[in-house]
Amino acid sequence: DLNVNQAAALCGFSKPALTRRLVQFNTSIIEILTDLRMNDAKDKLTKSFLSISEIAISLGYSDATAFSRAFKKYNGQSPSSYRRENKAGATK
């Protein structure tokens, strides 16, 4: 549940200072946090037997619907479809 202010503090910057620095790289802290969250989601979808709801909650989403909407917007497919196409050697 890392937020923008926490991320800035971890980097040793204020939120505005971090924002200014990231503009130089054509990105934002929100984009970076979203990338990290979606990579974690992909990992959990392919390497665990957690339900979509459990994954959603573990990533800080309010429910599976909110997670599914965000995942589809970011990845172009639903979490269930992604799991079906990419699941290999999942463990608990």
Image (cartoon, grey):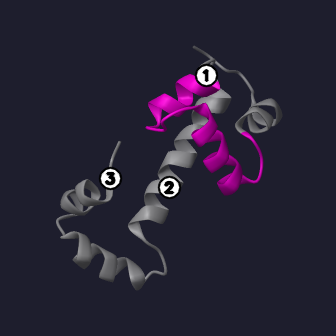
Name the element at disc 1. Answer: loop
Residue lying furthest top: 92
Q: Which residue is mark 1?
A: 48
**In percent of the image, x 53 and y 55: which residue is there?**
35
**In percent of the image, x 24 and y 54: which residue is there?**
6
- Type of secondary structure dominating the magenta stretch: helix
Instruction: Give the side of residue 3 with respect to residue 44, left or right.
Output: left
**What range of the chain is rendered magenta?**
52-78
* Picture quarter with the C terminus: top right
The disc, 2 or 1, on the residue closer to the chain's N-terminal end is 2
The disc, 1 or 3, on the residue closer to the chain's N-terminal end is 3
Graded by Cα atoms within 10 Å as few (under 14), some (14 to 19) or many (20 or more), the crowding at tag 2 reads: some
The disc, 3 or 2, on the residue closer to the chain's N-terminal end is 3
Instruction: Check contact, mark 2 vs mark 1: CB within 8 A.
Output: no
Quarter occupied by residue 60: top left
Vertical comparison of 84 with 50: above or below: below
Name the element at disc 3. Answer: loop
Q: Which residue is mark 3?
A: 3
Circle 3: residue type: Asn
Name the element at disc 2. Answer: helix
Whole-angstrom CA distance, mark 1 to mark 3, is 25 Å
Q: Which residue is mark 2?
A: 34
Graded by Cα atoms within 10 Å as few (under 14), some (14 to 19) or many (20 or more), the crowding at tag 3 reads: few
